[in-house]
Image (spheres, helix red, strand yellow):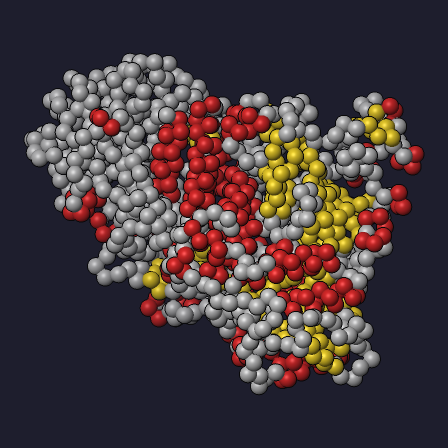
Amino acid sequence: MNVNQSAAPVPPFGQPQPIYPGYHQSNYGGQPGTTAPPTSYGAYNGPVPGYQQTLPQGVSRAPPSSGAPPVSTAQAPCGQTAYGQFGQGDVQNGPSSTVQMQRLPGSQPFGSPLAPVVSQPAVLQPYGPPPTSAQVTAQLAGMQISGAMAPAPPPSGLGYGPPTSPASASGSFPNSGPYGSYPQGQAPPLSQAQGHPGVQPPQRSAPPLASSFTPPASGVPRMPSMTSPLLPGQGFGGPPVSQPNHVSSPPPQALPPGPQVTGPPGPPPPMHSSQQPGYQLQQNGSFGPTRGPQPNYGSPYPGAPTFGSQPGPPQPLPPKRLDPDAIPSPIQVIEDDRNNRGSEPFVTGVRGQVPPLVTTSFLVKDQGNASPRYIRCTSYNIPCTSDMAKQAQVPLAAVIKPLARLPPEEASPYVVDHGESGPLRCNRCKAYMCPFMQFIEGGRRFQCCFCSCINDVPPQYFQHLDHTGKRVDAYDRPELSLGSYEFLATVDYCKNNKFPSPPAFIFMIDVSYNAIRTGLVRLLCEELKSLLDYLPREGGAEESAIRVGFVTYNKVLHFYNVKSSLAQPQMMVVSDVADMFVPLLDGFLVNVNESRAVITSLLDQIPEMFADTRETETVFAPVIQAGMEALKAAECAGKLFLFHTSLPIAEAPGKLKNRDDRKLINTDKEKTLFQPQTGAYQTLAKECVAQGCCVDLFLFPNQYVDVATLSVVPQLTGGSVYKYACFQVENDQERFLSDLRRDVQKVVGFDAVMRVRTSTGIRAVDFFGAFYMSNTTDVELAGLDGDKTVTVEFKHDDRLNEESGALLQCALLYTSCAGQRRLRIHNLALNCCTLLADLYRNCETDTLINYMAKFAYRGVLNSPVKSVRDILITQCAQILACYRKNCASPSSAGQLILPECMKLLPVYLNCVLKSDVLQPGAEVTTDDRAYVRQLVTSMDVAETNVFFYPRLLPLTKSPIESTTEPPAIRASEERLSNGDIYLLENGLNLFLWVGASVQQGVVQSLFNVPSFSQITSGLSVLPVLDNPLSKKVRGLIDSLRAQRSRYMKEDKLEMLFKHFLVEDKSLSGGASYVDFLCHMHKEIRQLLS
């Protein structure tokens, strides 16, 4: 039978689709012949014996506290090939044109792979013994990225077979029509379905609904898989052909010597230089295409086997490497969205529009729906029925950031004052007036858009309607024309029916031995002298209305009277910490300008007073109790700034013991590490919330301090936790002071209550974030700042209507910094759909990941970490399997088909699964995990996006005069070139990685040393040099820091840098992106079968 016979053409199916080359799949149908034994792999996500990952030779340095990045020397271990030797000078995200070369066995990390991707009846798979390590090395050595032999379609009637393969990168075949032969009754695999009006990929008139790849089913170097034998009586089918409308398996590797085929071997296919239309060359980073070894031809590099047609002993098939450039690239998706949607303003007038990605810089024009800066949803088109929602498994959630800061070009929400009558509301559901309310009866009544109740319009609010039924003053009133606005609240919205006093800030400073020894107390007191001039103030106010107070503590508490009439501050000591009270009222909370001299004197004296202290023990709960009592006595809300250094072991309420135990990791008791030790802090937090007392905690631990317990009060009061492990003034001063300045100056809403109302058919059922809830509907926040989000999940309680859609209204009642009671309202209208395809076409993956991470991070409090991870994987597989089953065009089971707007779901979800909370490495402390867990809980979508998939920026690629940020590259070791310098940031950490072969001029310009070997590996600040490159890099670091809500820590550890290359296998056993994608595909196929 001739391998090159032509295939029966199949009619084209659907529109031409963009191509993801090289997602290989081996023959699912199998072929008769001697069995190729499967490679033996570890369990999915298990640690790999002897696994060692090497970076290209280079330095990863801590960036400077001044604004420069981190750096540490990473030499490739002796005898191990560094990638730099391959001359990967031009590492790109996309295919490049450099010559492709093979990787040597030592240079390819060989990770713990996943379970097999092929599901075949067991009877048909007589597997041989697992290969020896020598065989595995031989497989790696012989690895080719494009092979020579064509796979065959399975016999007709077989339920799954490989899609026919495109021609090998440089070949075309005689007689091949537009399609290859398919099994009878099976349509050709299609990669993408119907177009949609959302984000448009470049060079397409209408974007696709889906992307598809064919994953390898045999021997990916980092992943297990099995090569199935040929079924008896099955021969080779038609030739591989290039297909314009989908990508399927590239040809497999040439078979190794041995009687692999039962028929006579066919001649090698003729190779032509013309590339077939519709099939892009397979390329990997800077590797170009090569020909696979051909029968009776010399091998492409010494040591590769030459394949003749002589039979020999059976040997394993050389594994195929899934080409990382053939699978969805986060960088490409981000870049495409920037190019397509960054230039036009996003106008919110249309219901159910999916906004640009959080990584795209765009302007918003509010025309009736809240800006995506305030609310982002997982889907903007929600299923009409709960059955449909259950089938799709896509969580319906909104990430709400009620006080989000806006760019200077966008106006803050208008403040509407309705006088004594207060804002107009629905009598039944209490929703506030908004653009979706329907005025009827000539404007005398309105119908509520949330509950359909008909309400009278008060005489003072009456206005006539125009011919379309709209009020003639609609565009003069923010609440009738905008998505976001504020109402001034009346006295009815205030506690005890009286307007609030302006809030107060209390600074509570640990003066135990640890705090004094590190220089923390002196540094803090010095900074506060000037920082108190920058307390938040309203609009154009000359000075802040906020009053301040000071407390110091170790085992006892010291209160200070800083009344303006005093010549010197007075100290009062409370040693009865079990029954805390405030020893003075008058003179404790003061106006900064009136008491400036006394405050300055106090801040000068504190470091001297405690300079010789030997007290190492501290209390913690009584300190918070004291601050709260002081606010209660002053009848105002406010914030406590706590600066604390050690585990509170002194005899007092809230005393803790050291319970750190790494042996609990990966056991059922691991969840106890995330739970508070005692219930005392929850009770205290509840009292704080009732008083409107928010707590911000700055921790400076040298060892375990039980962050899981200490962060309970900040977490439940809407506060923040900052952690500076092993604090040293010279290294950490800039980070601490920057965080402190930002924290003290940011605008905060105090004593806040938030409620989310929805139109009939859905309701808010679950909430995630830093807040307290005493009932099922009201989110209570002692404080809420512009960085905090509340994530809300919705469920169906009735059928929704496609015509009317679904509405959300978030109402936040809060006290401003000036003591004014206000209501901030955000409205959003969503579409509803009866077709699953519409749901999948309007999802937002970044928001979905934000929700899933918070869901998982809360789950670890009550469930074993492994089961939390499994739930995430299962849910992701169900989402994608439902799409595959109900929305994708029919195609071979060998293809992985992803919805276009969810094609990054697997890579991002894998980053969540590999994060320190869900899969800690050996060096991650219990406190680190608890810290990150509470941090992510209130992150917004932009923060989780960069936190889970860090940005990696090459610094020497773009021209020096360019002022724009250099384009990012994918977070993988393969993308690093020894001749370049990279900056990596994830919102918390910052690294500068220097390749060993960087030009001497560049090293001189940045580090002021003549050569790479002379760069100090402990460097944490880039020297300030007067040259264009140094200015550019330092400017870039400053601009990155300005974008983030916290000052990024400079890290020097190479291990940590590698940990953030999230597309690679992690040292803690997390799967690489390629492995995880294949694992996901296997899970989806199991669900579908």
Query: Residue 758 versus residue 1018: which sits nearer the camera?
Result: 758
Residue 957: x percent and y percent? 42, 52
The answer to whether residue 751 shows anywhere in this view is yes
Query: Residue 109 versus residue 857: which sits nearer the camera?
Result: 857
Residue 708 falls left or right of residue 686: left
Which quadrant holds residue 175? Answer: top left
Residue 594: x percent and y percent? 80, 74
Query: Residue 536 versus residue 266: which sits nearer the camera?
Result: 536
Residue 684 falls left or right of residue 196: right
Task: Give the residue drawn at x 85%, y 43%.
Answer: 422
* Depicted 990 relative to depicted 577: above or below: above
Which quadrant holds residue 294? Answer: top left
- Farthest residue to the right: give it: 459
Residue 201 falls left or right of residue 480: left
Query: Residue 92 versus residue 774: which sits nearer the camera?
Result: 774
Task: Give the residue drawn at x 79%, y 66%.
Answer: 634
Task: Give the residue drawn at x 16%, y 31%.
Answer: 35
The answer to whether residue 962 shows anywhere in this view is no
Task: Give the residue drawn at x 19%, y 19%.
Answer: 234
* Depicted 247 relative to depicted 519: above or below: above
Task: Look at the image and tell me in which quarter the C terminus lies.
Answer: top left
